[in-house]
Amino acid sequence: MNRISKIFQPLLIIPKNAVVRNQDLTSKSQRLMMECGLIRPSGNGSFFILPILQRSVEKLVGIIDHHMQKIDCQKITMPTLTSADLWKMSGRFEDAQSELLIVKDRHEKLHLLSPTHEESITSLLASIAGTSYRLFPLKFYQITSKFRDEMKPRFGLIRAKEFLMKDLYTFDCDLESAKISYETVNEQYKNLFDYLEIPYVKIEADTGLMGGNISHEYHILTSIGEDHIVQCKKCNKAVNKELLNEKQLICDECVPEDIEQHEGIEIGHTFVLEDKYTKALNATYLSKKGKPEILQMGCYGIGVTRLIAASIERFSTESEIRWPIPIAPFKLCIIPPKEGSKEQEKVKDLMEEIDNFLKSKEKSLRDDVVIDDRTQITIGKRLMHTKRLGIPFIIVIGSKAAEEINPTVELHDLNQNIVHELSITDALNKVMSQIKTYEIV
Amino acid sequence: MNRISKIFQPLLIIPKNAVVRNQDLTSKSQRLMMECGLIRPSGNGSFFILPILQRSVEKLVGIIDHHMQKIDCQKITMPTLTSADLWKMSGRFEDAQSELLIVKDRHEKLHLLSPTHEESITSLLASIAGTSYRLFPLKFYQITSKFRDEMKPRFGLIRAKEFLMKDLYTFDCDLESAKISYETVNEQYKNLFDYLEIPYVKIEADTGLMGGNISHEYHILTSIGEDHIVQCKKCNKAVNKELLNEKQLICDECVPEDIEQHEGIEIGHTFVLEDKYTKALNATYLSKKGKPEILQMGCYGIGVTRLIAASIERFSTESEIRWPIPIAPFKLCIIPPKEGSKEQEKVKDLMEEIDNFLKSKEKSLRDDVVIDDRTQITIGKRLMHTKRLGIPFIIVIGSKAAEEINPTVELHDLNQNIVHELSITDALNKVMSQIKTYEIV
């Protein structure tokens, strides 16, 4: 079991007034994440991920791994540095230059700090040209730091210069198969976001610099969103406003009165890229007839750190973080009585009961529980603090737990905004059965 | 359970002759890792980590996490880019420049692609100055990509320009406590390397650019090692030859005849840094008397991708990879009969038995098993391939498995170089009990 005294130290020691200077604190999530010791700025648009948030990031990485591998995606790691020559071959070096961070090595060669890896993965595929059509589709993904030289980094992890991204690339023998791969991945994005219980909007999107003709974005709607989403109330279809300039209408039947506009934060983006990169870099397969043919490609991103920040932006109150339960840094916090209080002695058996209960559970569940063992602090203060951090379930061992007859504890269910008064056994079982529903098998 | 047809595709499709061009193939491990589809070059000293090796990397990361967190190290992520200004404050910007990759952002600010993070973490500690002495020691670590503009990248992942490193930083209130932290971490390095069953040599080392007075290196001895280690046969004490230029003698009693020289690959390095960085960046704590005092610091690295490559270099034969069992990409491979062979029909019950056996096991064990379901290929070829990849345990369902009386399978224990003939139940139980010994609780 985890103990707050062991892991929350940076949180405890960050003075509230120290975190706000020099930062564009226009978003609620950034302020809350700084106040709760989840992140700290290290430069303009650049952040330390502190221990509590590191847990959430690793949880989300595990959940994404699970969902990607279910549809036969293979995890790899591509180098951060991509040769500028490859981007010159695809034609993107000039187009994207203003947002690229470029480094020259001691041999005077230029490399990008890759914001995305279409050229890199396609060069890998090109190097195994001569691969039989039988082995496709191939799907490769990675979860690594990406870089963008933002003109104006904003909102903490939502628009940072360095961020964690999942990028997946699919390769197929023809466009029809590429579209099937596209559907498979989009279906799995739905499963992933549904599992996370994130309310998202999927919209038709512009393909922009990326290439191809088909593209969708996944958005979390919040007032600080920088994308404008136009949606028809009647048919529910939605598009990025950028795209509307060309298309004018969302659907055939929609009339101006049905049209609504929302602001969204993009958390995912999918593209059928067709042969833009595979042709430029000559990535081929061997057809049934034994002839080399150009591969068809798709690419699919999820902003990992951005998804966390955007869901905090969406779910939190002004003063308290709320998490999608699967990626909360801990799922249950237990707050025992204050040291020296009259309750403390009386609940010793109860604390042992909790200990035995947790010991009987699997490691993965046990690791999701944290005891707020800072017993020199009052229950009230510790509860306030834990609620601010948004741990979804909190069990408070208060004065009623010390009663002779029917001792009870408080079970706070933050996401439902309910407090239950239950025996310790009932409280623990209730929490565990809730947590179990999120188990990935 | 994993199926080779689903995950080994890049391995299967990499033609042997395609991987050797343009590369300095002076090491056995680099050749074997390329031939087995574990890595592919992406540029000079830069590599793709392919799906099979990705599994090993993630296993090693999990094992390091476990060992670090056991001694209360807190995991974080620091930005890859560190402001050059910080390195100017510590005085290292000029000293290390030839090996630094430097990038200028759109606001003309210089950043390093960090090869290490002493300045970065110290700036974090400096920003929480005013922290009570009671909260120390603090230990922060990360496992992230690091960069070095090598003059001559060599031996694949052993000397690459981009590599995965675990870097840990400890902060204490006085030098005596810093030395206790140093001992704690070094003790845990011993536990970690012992768990991995890696034969290492710990030596006294030069502190070089890093600073401080106390430093040790951990080496795997192999003929391609670039460090020269001088050891006294009698007292077993060992030092880096660099250091010997100053000291002349290893110990008080050693005589020239007792001195041996070995070549080693450095896989870990530890330093007591004292106040070199904390003083330069003014990282203080609040003493008992309420006075700000400069912190004392230590730093501790492990080359994650290098450790994997170095142990492959040490353990493998000329033609077959051998892994430390805990980081083998899979622990058990099962090879069923060839499609259409007379055995295939007869062993159907056996295959079901295996399936049920594995289903009854925990997910973590199941995930370590792979079935070589490329049944269009002969058993012999698949066995050759699996041995080349070095999966430590291989169960072959051959002709003897189809016999009416006492059917048996072959259990190959590669690391022990033994083949057992056993009933399937005995074979599975034998493997599982072996694997169990590596379980981390």
Image: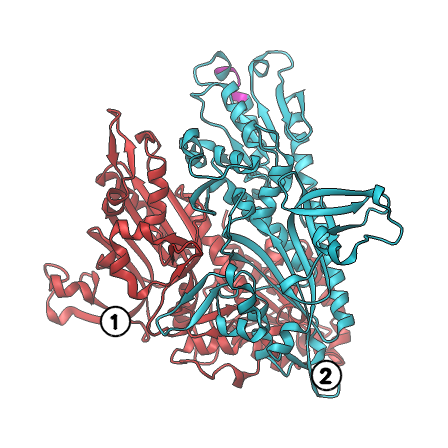
Chain colours: A red, B cyan
In-image side of B99 versus B208 (left or right): left
- Which numbered circle lies on residue B413? none
What residue is pinned by disc 1? A262
**B328 up-or-down from A409: above or below:** above
Specify few, some or many for label 2: CA neighbours under 10 Å numbering under 14, 14-19, or 20 or more: some
Q: Chain of mark 2?
A: B
Q: Is residue A186 visible?
A: no
| Residue B50 place in picture, x, y as percent | 46, 42
| Residue A365 place in picture, x, y as percent | 59, 56
Image quadrant of residue B200?
top right
Q: Is residue A404 visible?
A: yes
At a point 29% along the width and 62% down the height, the residue shown is A97
Residue furthest to the bottom in view is B290
Image quadrant of residue B17?
top left
At a point 72% along the width and 78% down the height, the residue shown is B134
In-image side of B398 versus A197 (left or right): right
The answer to whether dots 2 and 1 both sit on one chain is no
Residue B191 on the magenta segment: no
Residue B373 vs residue B60, the one in the foreground: B60
Residue range (magenta): B345-349
What residue is pinned by disc 2? B287
Q: CA distance from mark 2 to mark 1?
A: 53 Å
In-image side of A394 versus A194 (left or right): right
Residue A78 vs residue B92, the one in the foreground: B92
